[in-house]
Image (spheres, rainbow, N blue to C red):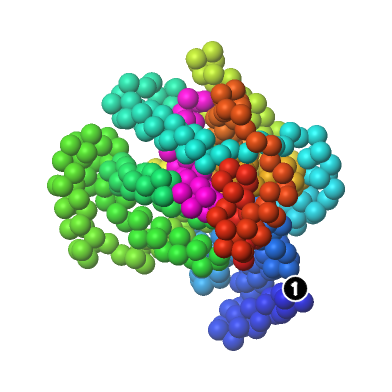
Amino acid sequence: MLAMLPIIVVMAVVFGILLGVRGDRITILALAAVTFVVACVPLVVDLARPGERRHVFISLLGLIFMIHYAVPALVFYVPATGGVPAPAMSTEVWPPDAIRGQLVALVGLVSLLLGYASPAGRVASTFLPKPKYDWSADVTLMVACVFIGTSWLLNAAALAGLVPPWVGTGFVGVFAHYYFYANALLVVLILRDRSAAALLVLVPNLLLAVSYGVFTSRKSQMLVGPMIVLLTYMLWTGRVRLRWFAAGAAVIALVYPMSQFVRYELGGQTRTLELLTDPAKTIDAIGDFISSDKTSFAQGLEATGARLDGLGVTSVIVRDTPSVSDFQNGRTIWLFFVAFIPRGLWPGKPDITLGGWITAVYGPGPQIKSATGPTQIGDFYLNYGWWSVIGGMAILGAILRAAYETLFRQRTPMALLLQIVIVYHLVVRFEGGVGALWSSMIFALTPVIMAQLAVRLFFNLPVYSENDGERGSSGAAAGLPADRGSGSAPLGSRS
């Protein structure tokens, strides 16, 4: 299969020529195919490994590169006859711009894979503490319920205006998201322990999260719960299903028009309490909109594609730096350290996210109403050009390898939850700046560490051994029940 991957590039170019693609757009098509092939390498290599030894971290990040850089090139930039408007910016991307953006992204992807394959990550993992204590089924369910209860309480308090806005942007705001992170623990209980109690908690929590997203017009709130369930299954079993990503894109395309209707027609977040006090009326209004001719799957698909287009903003940054804005020489990356200073101690603390600044500097215009994240590639290029893309993505690859060696080999609920937090940020927030992504990831990891310390203090936990997985696998094969709380094998290894 590895030998066949280059053939995909040749076939793509040949088909493009037969379909009438000419000039620079052939180059865009070829670079998109090369990006697709390079991003597929970890997936193809993993096919030769058993599920519990697959490198899911790097495989998922390869898919993210496809979504942000290869797919937009094929959908927007190859078929266009002129310039393509960059997402949420008042500037157009022309073929030479897109080619330079693709080359920078491709170099970043290769650097990421080389950094992951280098011994640096494996060496670093030897100095990192490994989660050696397992959580029993009862303890795991208790922690999940505490996370869910605390999180929904904070969301309700924020909805009622009892939480100041500046509090929600810091450490306290992290707990407000743990109602969907907790789904990972519940899925582990279902897969490992066949827990009916976990299923009884998971289903209402998912339904409540989707409903909350509908009434607040937040697309991410509607989709992130089911996404966490699928990501947990992928990480626990080592199986990455490409069709799930295609289905996810279709669901986003359906959700987008409904979210826009709730936000701009019904009032959205500014009238959330009113919408919640009369849910039947709200649901009727949404139903009428969905059944009308105002909603369009094609419109939602186009909006989704523009939302996931990382090539456009990267191309603009590469083209206009340093002509429009000077290289930042590390300024935007150092925002990572600024993020940990409480705004209460520093009232003038700069904004950690770069979307507003990117749009104002690189794509200003009176019609611009939203911000555009620079993507990890774009933010690295902002600082030192090609060199920071190469070095930054290589370091990211080494960090992911260290995380894999430290966490993925430990088949415990805590290790799985840490993996989910890392993967969620890489998948969902890849389009953001470096400082915002990595600081928010560390904030989000902190409650898991706190939970582990609390559990260790009050419960006598068994020490996890990798041999536990082998014993669980043989027991399952013999038709015996899994050993609860002892780190029994995932479904992937039972097969």
- Taking the view exactly as shown, the residue that stands out farthest to the bottom is 18
Name the image quarter holding the N terminus. Answer: bottom right
Label 1 crowd (10 A; few <14 / some 14-19 / many >=20) = few
Instruction: Decide whether residue 193 is among the magenta residues.
Output: yes
Q: Main secondary structure of the magenta part?
A: helix
Residue 337: image location, x then y, percent: 65, 26
Q: Quadrant of residue 251?
A: bottom left
- Name the one closer to the observer, 464 or 451: 464
Camera-nearest residue between 428 and 378: 428
Q: What stretch is highlighted in magenta?
A: 169-195
Residue 236 falls left or right of residue 211: right
Residue 97 location (% of width, % of height): 62, 58
Q: Can residue 341 be seen in this view?
A: yes
Q: Residue at x 24, y 41 (%)?
A: 267
Quadrant location, the C terminus: bottom right
Q: Circle 1 sits on which residue?
A: 2
**Amino acid type, mark 1:** Leu
Nearer to us in this view, 439 or 234: 234
Q: Note whether 195 is above or below 50 in the view shown.
A: above
